[in-house]
Every structure is written in C-alpha cells, then in structure tokens.
Amino acid sequence: MEILLVFIIGLLHAGGLYMLLRRSMFKMIIGLILLGNGANLLIFLIGRLVKGKPPVIDEGLKVFADAYADPLPQALVLTAIVIGFGLQSFAIILIKRVYNVLETDDLDELNSTDEEL
Amino acid sequence: MSNPYIILPIVFHMAAAVILMFCWFQPRVQKLLSILFSLIGLGISVWLFRLVWHEGFQVTQAGNWDAPFGISFIADTLGSTLGLLSSISLLAVSIFSTVSMREERIKFGYFPTLHFLIMGLQGAFLTADIFNLYVWFEVVIISSFVLLTLGGKKTQLEGALKYVSLNLLASTFFLIGIALVYGLTGSLNLADVAIKIGAVENRGLVNMTAGLFLVAFGIKSALFPMYFWLPASYHTPPAAISAIFAGLLTKVGVYAMVRMFTMVFIGDTFMSITLSGLAALTIISGGLGAIRQQHLGKIFGYLIICHIGFLFAGLGIFTELALVGTIFYLIHDIVVKTNLFIVAGLMNKLTGSPFIKEQGGLYAKYPLLSLLFAIPLFSLVGIPPLSGFWAKVYLIQASFETREFLLVGSIIFGSFLTLWVIAKVWSESFWKDKPEASSSGKPWSTFSTKEKWGILVPIMFLSIVSLYIGLAAENIISLASRIAAELMDPSAYINSILGMK
Amino acid sequence: MMLLIVLSGFLFSALTRPIGSIFKQALPWVFTALPVLLFIYFCSQIGVVSSGDSLTWTYKWVPSLGLDLVFELNGLSLLFALLITGIGSLVFFYSTYYLKGHAYMDRFYGYLSMFMASMLGVVLSDNLLALFIFWELTSISSFFLIGFNNEDPKSRKSALTALSITGLGGLVLLGGIILLSSIGGTYSFSELLSQRNSILSSSSYCWILVFVFIGSFTKSAQFPFHFWLPGAMKAPTPVSTYLHSATMVKAGIFLLAKMTPLLGGTPAWNHTLMIVGGITMVYAAIHSLFRVDLKGILAYSTISALGILVFLIGVGTEKALLAVGIFILTHALYKAALFLITGIIDYQTGSRDVSQLKGLQHVMKPVAIAGFIAALSSAGFPLFLGFLSKEIMYEATFKYAEIGILLTAAIVLTKIFLLVAGFWAGISPFTGELPENLKATKKPSPILWVPPLLLGVGSVLFGVFPALIEQSLIQPVFANISGLDTSIYLALWHGFNTVLLLSILTLIIGTAIYFQWKPSEGKFARTLRFEKISPQTLLEGFAVGFHTFAGVWTRAVQNGYLRNYVLSILAFLTVIMGYRFYEGVSIYLDWNQLSEITPSEVIVVTLMVISIIFAIVSTSRTASIVALGVVGFANCLFFLFYSAPDLAMTQFSIDTLTVLLFMLVLFKLPKNKIFSSKRIRIRDAVLSVLFGLLIAILTLEVFEEPSVTDISKYYADNAYLLAKGRNVVNVILVDYRGMDTLVETTVLIIAAIGVFSLIKLNLNPSKEQ
C-alpha cells in the first residue's frame, strides 16, 4: 500500500509543480494546493501506516496496550493543514484582487515590476 | 542555564500586536503604542543580549517537557544578537511609519501586522525545534504578505503575486524537508537531530534532504538562481515596509541556513562548492542587476542580493574566519539596509520621483541631509573604516586561505560594483541639478516639525548604530568571533538544550 | 601627538560647519593654519629623522584583526609629509583668494583637509591595513573634489571615472595586502620586512605583485590606467595642484618605494616596473606636446613624470633609487608651481589656451618669474634642482647592464619632450607681445603669486646648495627605499662625461623643439584620430560592453515570467537532488515493512489519480475546483483508514472551506485557457515528473530507514500519566507542542487581517477620476 501512497505523493508533487509552471494565476493556486496536499501526505506516510489503531488510549488504561499509530506526524500534519489553509485562502483572495485590478488571469502580462527601471 | 523568560521577546510582541488590534480605528493611539512597544521590545532584547553575553546560553523548555520531547527555546549568542538587531530595525521603522504611513493603511492593521512580523522573527531566532521554526517562518511570511499587499496598489499586487507564490513554494520544500528529517532521525529538536543525523547510514538520503533545505532557505534568502521574487516586489510597498523587509526578511533565511548547515547538514565538498559557487553567482548577478537600474528601490534591492552573496561566501568557505566575516556582515547589513530604504523613501519624497535620473539637486539644497544620507550609503560600500569594510577583510582572507580565488574575485568585483552604483546614485541624485521636466517633490521646509523628527530620528539612530559598528569594529569582531566559534563547535548549543553538562 | 597630527585634518573636516558658523568669512584662514602648523612640526623633526631615528606611535585599534594604528616617521614618510603639509599650506593659502566668494567654500576646505589627513595617514602608517584605509579615503576625497563643480556633467563623469579606476585598484590592493599578511602573518610592514625571504619564495609572490602593481598603477595613473588623471583636471586648479600632481597620485609611487625593500629586487618586480613606467613616460610625454589646454599639458607631463618614477624604481640600482628620492621633491616643487601659475592665468584672463596666451609678463611679473624658474627646473638647467635629479637619472640608466643604452635613450627622449611641455606651460604664456584682448588683464593678488614663487625659491635654493637637503632629507629617504646605509653624495659638478653630454644635448634639442613646435588645435585634432585605439576608448568601450552585458544578463534572469522563475528553481533543485541521488543513495525495498493493498484502498487511489489528472487538464475552472475537492476528500479517506480520525476531520472541514472559498471568489473568472505551446508543456511535464519521481523515491527510502520512535513513544507513554489526556494527538497539540498550535492560530489571525485589507482597502486611483 505504501508504494501506492508514494506514487500518489510523487504525482501530487509533479502535478502541483506542473501547474505552477503554467501561465494562469488560477492554475498556480491549484498547483500550490496540490503541493500542500502532497506534503501533508508525505509527513503522514513518514509516520508509518497503522490500520485502525488511532493513538487514543482506551478508557480504563493508562498506557497503550498494543500497537498504535505514531501520533507526532499526525499532529504535525494537523498544524500544517491549518497553516496551509491560512496561506492558501490569502493567496486565493490575492489573485481575486489581482484579477479585479488588472483584469487578466495571464501571469505573463503581470511583469511590469520586473522590468528594468 | 534554564530561564523561562527568554521567550519574553516573542510573548511581548504578540501581546503588543493584540493590544494594537484592539485600537483598530485609532491610528494616533496605534502610532504612540507602537513606538512605546518597540522601545520596550528593544529594552527586552538588550536585556536578553546582555544576559547571554555575560552568562552564556539561556534555555527554556516550553510546557516544561524535557528536551527533546517538548519544544525547546534557546537564546544563544547568534539568536540574541539577531533578536537585538531586529528590535533596532523595528524601532526605527515604527518611528518612521508614524509619519510616513498613510492613515488608511494604519486603519487596516499595519501596526499589529508589523509587530506580528517581529514576533515571528524573534521566534525563529530563539526556537530550537525544526517544526517550530517552520511555524515561525509561516508567521513571518504571512505577515510579510499582508504588509506587502496592504493598500492593494497595482504594482504591489503584481509584485506580491510572485513574492507569495515563490515563498509558498519555499515553505512547501521546507515542510517536506522537515518530514524527511523526522523520518530519518525520529526527532524535531535541533540539538537532538544534530546528534542523530550522524547515525543515519544512508548518507545519500541526508544529502538529498539537505538539497531541499538549500532550496527552501535559498529562496527565502534570495540566493541565485532563486531570488526572482525580490527585485519583483521589494520596491513596490511604502518605504517603511520595504525598509523592514530589506533589513530582516532575507536575513532570517540566511539565519536558518547558517543554523541548519552548521549543525545538521555539515557540508561535504560538493555542498561547499555549491554554496561557494552560488555565492559568487549571487554577488555578480546582484551587482549586474544593480548597475542597470534607475529606480532607487530596485538598485538597493539588487544590492541586497549582491550582499547576500557575501553572507553565503562565508558559509561556503566554512572556516571560523569566514564565519566571522559572514556574521559581521550580517550585523552590518541588517542595520544599513533598513536605513537605506528609509533614506530612499525620503529621497523619493523630496524629489518627487523614485528614479535617479529624475532626481537631483539634493546636495545643493540640503547639504546637511546629504551628509546624513552619505553615512548609510558609504557604509554600504564599505569605505573604510565604515561598517561594510571589516567583514570583507575577513572574507577575503578566509578565501585566500582556502584558496577559493573565485570568491576573492567576486567579492572584490561585487564591492567594486557596489562602489560604482553608490557613486552613481550620489552623482545623479545629489550632485546633478534637478531636471526641469521632472515632477517636483515636497520640499523639506514644508514638512511639519513632527514629520521632520519622525524621519530624522530613525535615520540618525540607525546611522549612529552603523557608525558604531564601523568605528568600534573591535567589539563587533569579538562578538562575531564568539558566534563563529559557537557555530563551528555546536556542542555547547546541543548540551545546553539537552540539559547535558 | 602623532594621532592628533594625522587626525586633526579629519577633525577639522568634521567640524567644518561649526568652524564656519564661528569664523564666517575667516574660515579659509582657520583651515590654512592647520597645514602650516603641521609643516612646522614636521620641519622640526628633520633633525631627529636624519640622525637615523624614526619616531613611532602606536594605538591598538582593532587588535583582533591585527589592525594597529602605527604611525612611523622615517625618511620616506617625512619627505612625503613635508610635501603634503608644505604644498598643502601653499594650496590652502592660495585657495583663500582663488575660490573667494564661492558658495561652497566651507565644503571645499572640509574635503581638502580630509584629504590631507588621509594622505598623511597613507605615508605615516606602518600597518598596511591602516595604510589601505587611508588610501581609500584619499580616493573618496578625490571623488568629492573632482566633482566639486557638480552642476557640470563632465565634472561628474570625471569624478566617477576617477573613483572607478582608483576604487577598483584600491580593492585589488586590499586583496594584495591581505594575501601578503596571510603569508607573513601580520599587517605590520616592519615585521613583514624580516620575512622577506619567505615571502619571495612563496607561491603567492607573483599574485601579491600583480595586486600591488594594479593598486599602485591605478592610483599613480600608469599606462593603461592613466586616463582618469587628465579627466580629474575638471577639479578646481588648487585641487589639481595638490591631489593630482603633488601628492595623491604619488601615493602609488610611495607604495612602490615603500615596498621595494620587501618585494623588490626580483626580475618580475624590476622588469614590470621598467616596462610599465617606460611606456607611460614616453607615451604621456609625447601626448603632452599635442595639448593646447595648459592643464592638459600639465596633466600629461605629470603622468610622464610619474612614469619616470615608476621606471626608476624598476631600474632599482642605488643611483636609480637615489634619483627617485630627489625627483619626487623636484617634481613636486616645479609641477605644483606650474599648476598654480596656470590657475593664476586662468583666473586673471579666463583662458588656458596656450596658443592664445602671450606676453603676460607685462601684467604679472612675479608670476612670470615663478614660471621661468619652474620651467627651467623642469628642463633641468644647471643651478636648478631639476638639473641634479636629471644627472642622477641619466647616470643610473646609463650604467644599467646591457640595456643601459636603450633605457637612457628612453629617458632622454622623455626628458626632451618634458622640457618642451614645461616651457610651454611656464615660459610661453609670458613671452612675446601682449595681444590686444589681454591688455585689460588685471594684476593678480599676492595671495596668488606668492605660493608659486616660494616653490621656485625652493627649486633654486636646493639646486644651488644641494647640501641643504643631502644629509637631512635625501639620505634617510634613500636608506628607506633601498634598505642600504650607503652614504649618498649630491654634487653639481660630476666632471666631463657622457652623462653631462647627454644632459647638454637634452637642453639643446629640447629648446630647439620648443622654438619649432607650436601646439595648436589642428595638431591636437590630428591626435584624436588615434583615440579609437587609446586605452581610454578601449576601457570605456569595455565598460559600455559590460553595461550592455549586465542588461542582457539581468533581463534574461529577471525576465518577468513567474513560470520561468519556478522553472529555474525547480531545475536547480532537481539537479542538486538528482546529483545527490546519483552520487550515492543505496536503494532497497523491504516488502515486509509494507502493508498489503485492499480493494477499497485501490478504489480511493484510483479516484485520487483520476481527480489529480482531471484538476490539471480540465479547461473548466469549476471542474478543476471540484476535482481539487475530491483530491482533498480522498486524502481524508487515507487519514481515516490509517488511524488518524482527527486529521480526517480537519482535512474534511478545511477542504470544504477551501473549495467553498474558491467557488465564491473565483467562479466569475473566465474559462481556463491554454496559453503555452505543446513543446513547453512537454518540457514542464518532464521536469515535474522527474522531480515527483525524486521525491517519491526519497520518501520511500526514508520510509524504509529503521525508524527511531523514542520520542513518539514518550508522548504515548506519558500522555495520560503526565498530561492527563487520552487522545495523544490532542495532547501533543495542546501540551507537548502547544507552542505550535498557539502560533498557528496567530497565522490565521494575520491571514484574516490580510484578507480583510485585501478586500476592503484599495488605494489605487479609482477609474472614474
């Protein structure tokens, strides 16, 4: 199964970057979100997959009785998801504003600040 | 030594930002409070710096969980020095903002965001946990996004688009890198990782992960060929915002790079060649960009890149001598670049144009102001004995000793290009008569007294600091040498965090 | 005391404004007092130095860098200090009248005293790093002084050119000094002297030479870097006198002379200096004949004289080094006088055109006398100091090994041309009939003519009585340069010999040429044909080319297209990681570590792959967004399968929010267009897939590494016991790593501020206006 997940991770990264390489702002955001998903999945996978044993200590016990999933990567992913959401929503609103002000979706037309001045 | 108060700089700026948010619609109150908070913040940083200087590293474990289980914070010499410099920059910028920032921007959360930004920086300088570092980085970049776009002008938005997308890309690489480091070592604590990473047998994996960190921090610190976002965006926001960015944002990337590549990824030959090569290319590419520009903000923007190369040169050489150079240059650069962008903002106002070909006559009209402006300009060039000079001596010496002649050449050449560019700025903006056709600026005499002080105090403050760095170089060298020694031998850092004697 | 001596100039310069406000009109006189006092001080030290002692004064400035301010007054530095303060006094004095009423009088004196202090620093420093610091300061003060008339674009350009050349040379010199110290282990010149042998035998010796030479040649205007000096003549004449003839340009000579006992005496040293100095002296002497602007003539004859000095240092015999010492003094005396005279003529008549100026002796007698003396000293007539130096020069070259004849020919030729140039500058304007248009010329003020006359007195006095300077001044200079304690002997009469013959020949031929050759605009114009291949044109062409290249480079790198930026970052990362992968990653796969694949998982994976691809290729925005949502939900399912219910929850809600936001905000956007060509898309796809592959392999291999789990085990073991929580993930979030969560919340708050301001605040000028 991990092989498949690794494949998905690779695909998410490749797809995300491919989208970042496009000229459309909209695709750029899609790309960033795909990349974010890939990164989260990667962290999750690194913590190793354990089926059906959430890291929750059963009632009445003080420590785990048997195997459990590594809780730390889960915590990291959780933080990363939330932070990612903050940044992504900012980015989405940003391109909305850019579109409103500059009326284009084509990144190639947005290069006035790079020009030699 | 264990000391829970070392997170005070973080907590304080967070509290400051929150209090400022409560004063959302009262710009005047915000201005006063921001200056007050910056002053107190500076006080705290000075206290922490002195404490570390006299009594050694200060450590605290968040939530009292022993390292490496909780998140450790450590104030070492490097961290506390950079914290101090951020506070200095913040104070200058916050005073400058009170007179230069449009009221609309203040009503949309300028000051709280500014303090959040500093909180993020302080956090990044103090944390000893890789994932926590990532989180602080995110605070820094989201704050910088907000500041960069605040006002939503056309150029701001265009610049921000590149800034945001490339920085998000860098963050993703950083995050992946962290995950891989966790996978390899099972730990996130910097000290713990530093120990455990040595035990990983499959070195290729460590090296590949180092590549991810190189690119992640390389983007953030504007290294060639990853600096594109900087010339596209740094000149677009108001001067105060550019100033704080110029002083601190790329530098936090350099800081992270220095930390990771002196503790975790001790470079092998390949990494060292890569870093040296990138440093040389960055210096030259930045210099080449600078000599082509007419926009003052862009000239200085490219010079930031050029000088980032100097910082990386020391890291590439990686001897104690070279690191002294890097650290000294870092200290100098933070102060001078902040000052320069404030000065650029004022020059823009006085002449009514950001383009040097349309500026002019400053020297004839304002001899004293020109003299004041000359301090940061020529400090940047490194006219001895001003602050930019000393670090170069170390860097050149270190390059000679390791026979990195390419670096010697690029450092000399980069210094020359900087000299030429600044002399050109001087010749155009100060010496030349103001061209008839160009828009007229706002004469100094029409500034209110409050405005005059609000502009002059930060410039003078930063100029005095940079003069001190230059003329009392001995003190800065002993500071930089101590930091360099600590970086070359991180055992003290590791032992303090892990609580070992 | 010495510190005060050197720094007093900086102090005065820093206090320009207060001094100005206290003394008002008297400011120039206050400043003039400074060099006069210093000159008196240095004169009083002649006795001490000539007795063979040297005065030293030390202050440890930056000890950790080995930078001490060590000021040492020995023969060589005393000679220069006397020139700096002596000619300084005259120039300061002269300028009080010359620049009277100039709006920026105060700045002028500020810069001038800053320059004087830096120059004193250069000649007095024993520590080479300190020497470099002062060296750079002279370049900077020169920049400000050349650009003093800053409204004139030519002034600004010349200032920039001069600073570029001397600045670059200075930086290279810094490299040389650092290299020297890294071999010798110290910046102290006197300590380095004792390590001469190890330096000469070091493999870096050759590089040190190259660096030091470039530093000296740029500063002392040697071919092919000489052209900044004629340009620097845009500065007011007192500045040209002081910086660009008498003192600053001699800093390079000073450095070479100082370095002779340390680095000199090798073929590389001697030959380079002879060749470069030789070319410079002949080239510039010829050039000086074609100028019609008095300052132009003087500029080129100065370059030629500097060439002679470099040449003599290159010859390096005892006689040659002795000649160096005397010629420095000689040249300073006559050339400064000629410059000052040119200034007077310019001031009184408004012209510097040598073909127009005639008969001025009728209106300015004392100036004419000074001019005659200077010209004759420059020509080397007997009873003038110039005669002495010329004799010794000829003697030195004549006796130099096999190529003595060649060297002598070169120097005689140079001397002949310089004689002509000197006559043109010092004699021609004063002789003949006074033209009508100059009849109205007023008599110059004594403040103007006294300084050149005083210099003339010096030339005659020392020329007639060489004993005055023989033991007191020249002997210690010679000792410093040569490192020998041979006694020197200066005599007017050397007996009848070839040298005397040559000397007389020089005078006769030179004078003959002077009467035959008239500089004119026409001749000057003819030389311009060669401009195309002059070093100035070539170097400027190179600079322009470089500037163009910088433009091409910058536009190529910073091309404005985000996709190219991403592309180069990605390519760089792929190369780095790919190389690291290729270099050594041991790949293995342990199937036992992997869990088996269940049908439900296969369905989810398939769903995910399809939706990722759909999100990429879809031309409808809405469809892309929906596909993106599906990717998120599939992610969510993975989390659910593998024991992460909290994650699944979070992912689900965040994903929903993102999709909603996307829909609300972006659904008005136009349809997705395909902008790029097929080739580009394939290139991007290949690169992305390559990167994805690398990440996938890296992930898999890291996953295969033996896992270290003591930290997460600690979390699990103590979650309930110490932190009182059963859900370990939650415990980590709120307790173990509570800081992360706190900061994460902050990120959301800041993002909210940003979103709010983005939506509400628009400072663009609105469209209606």
Image: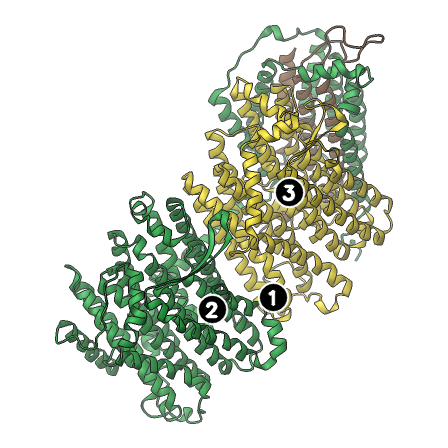
Chain colours: A brown, B yellow, C green
Mark 1 lies on a secondary structure that is: loop
The subunit letter for the residue under badge 2 reads: C
Q: CA distance from mark 2 to mark 1?
A: 29 Å
Q: Quadrant of residue C557?
A: top right
Q: CA distance from mark 1 to mark 3?
A: 38 Å
**Foreground of the two, B277 or C625:** B277
* Mark 2: few/some/many CA within 10 Å (<14, 14-19, 20+): many
Q: CA distance from mark 3 to mark 2?
A: 38 Å
**Residue type of the residue flagged with mark 1:** Gly
Residue placed under numbered mark 3 in the picture: B81
Up-down relation of residue B120 to residue C717 (above or below): below
* Mark 3: few/some/many CA within 10 Å (<14, 14-19, 20+): many
Q: Return the disc, 1 or 3, that comes first in the chain's sequence.
A: 3
Mark 2 lies on a secondary structure that is: helix
Residue placed under numbered mark 2 in the picture: C116
Q: Position of residue B308 (x, y in %)?
A: 56, 44
**Residue type of the residue flagged with mark 3:** Thr
For residue B149, side relative to residue C134 (left or right): right
Judge whether residue C164 can be spotted in this image. no
The number of numbered discs placed on residues in the rendered structure image is 3
Labels 3 and 2 positioned on one and the same chain: no
Labels 1 and 3 positioned on one and the same chain: yes
Residue placed under numbered mark 1 in the picture: B360
Q: Nearer the viewer, mark 1 or mark 3?
A: 3
For residue C329, side relative to residue C172 (left or right): left
Up-down relation of residue B457 to residue B187 (above or below): below
Residue ID at (74%, 56%): B100
The subunit letter for the residue under badge 3 reads: B
**Foreground of the two, B447 or C382:** C382
For residue B455, side relative to residue C71 (left or right): right
Mark 3 lies on a secondary structure that is: helix
Q: Quadrant of residue C717?
A: top right
